[in-house]
Image (spheres, rainbow, N blue to C red):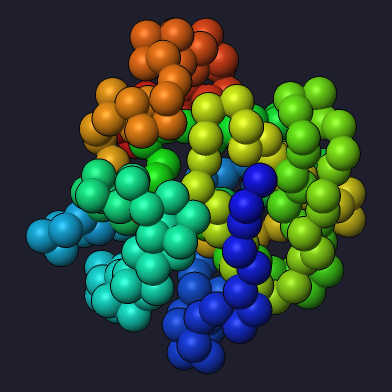
Amino acid sequence: MKFKIIDNFFTTKDFEDVSSVNLDRIGRSDLRVYHNSIDKNLNIKSSCMTPETVKRLHLNYHQQAIDLLNELNPLKTKLYEYSEFHIIETGADYEFPIHDDTPNKLLSGVVYIKPTKNTGTIFCKNKNGDKKKIIDWRINRAVFFSRKERETWHFYKGDGESNRIALVYNLMTNRIKDVYRIEGKNYFLGNLRYKLNPYLYRFFNFVI
């Protein structure tokens, strides 16, 4: 599986703005997602960052994200409709299960925000977690990949010591049937699979 690692992804100001966002307290075994998005017409939805910050992040990094998608999966670039800048806090003892990402994500990205030490993204060969490849956690490090049905297996978790805060930067689409066509996969089987998965369907159903 192909992925790209970019250190010092955000400028100093952008990183400071993202890392200073006020978040609610969560338990050691909890997960909290703060949804922020912007579409091609600059319509913004925000829950934890100001609309101005969401717009600035979009303007500053959109072309770089498109270039990454062109490199990793160029056929999907034409499907782009909106971007997500979600803040995700993972409790110290929380583990999100192994998954391959929902099909509405054209480019999946994460930027590690805080603390200084934690667990990065863990890629696997299959859903059983074989042949793990751990991306080391480093502040302001970004990791990007383009999902593919039953191939881009990965998961994340807390390190058992402190909560894990990351910004998820995704390029998104609503054209799900076109995604499966480009991937050469079956839309009906794939869609059913996500509906039967309580972890992924809850998130998939929200963002589409």
In the rendered image, is residue 206 in sight?
A: no
Q: Which of the 4 quarters of the picture holds residue 186?
A: top left
Q: Residue at x 51, y 12 (%)?
A: 193
Percent position of residue 138, x then y:
75, 73
In the rendered image, is residue 40 in sight?
A: yes
Q: Residue at x 41, y 58 (%)?
A: 69
State whether residue 7 is above or below residue 73: below
State left or right for residue 103 relative to residue 126: left
State left or right for residue 99 relative to residue 20: right
State whether residue 119 is above or below residue 149: below
Q: Residue furthest left?
A: 41
Percent position of residue 150, x then y:
60, 25
State whether residue 127 is above or below residue 12: above
On-image quarter of the C terminus: top left
State left or right for residue 165 relative to residue 169: right
In front of the other: 45 or 2? 2
State whether residue 74 is above or below residue 173: below
Percent position of residue 128, x then y:
81, 23
Q: Which of the 4 quarters of the picture holds residue 181?
A: top left
Q: Residue at x 34, y 80 (%)?
A: 60
State left or right for residue 196 relative to residue 135: left
Percent position of residue 169, x then y:
46, 58
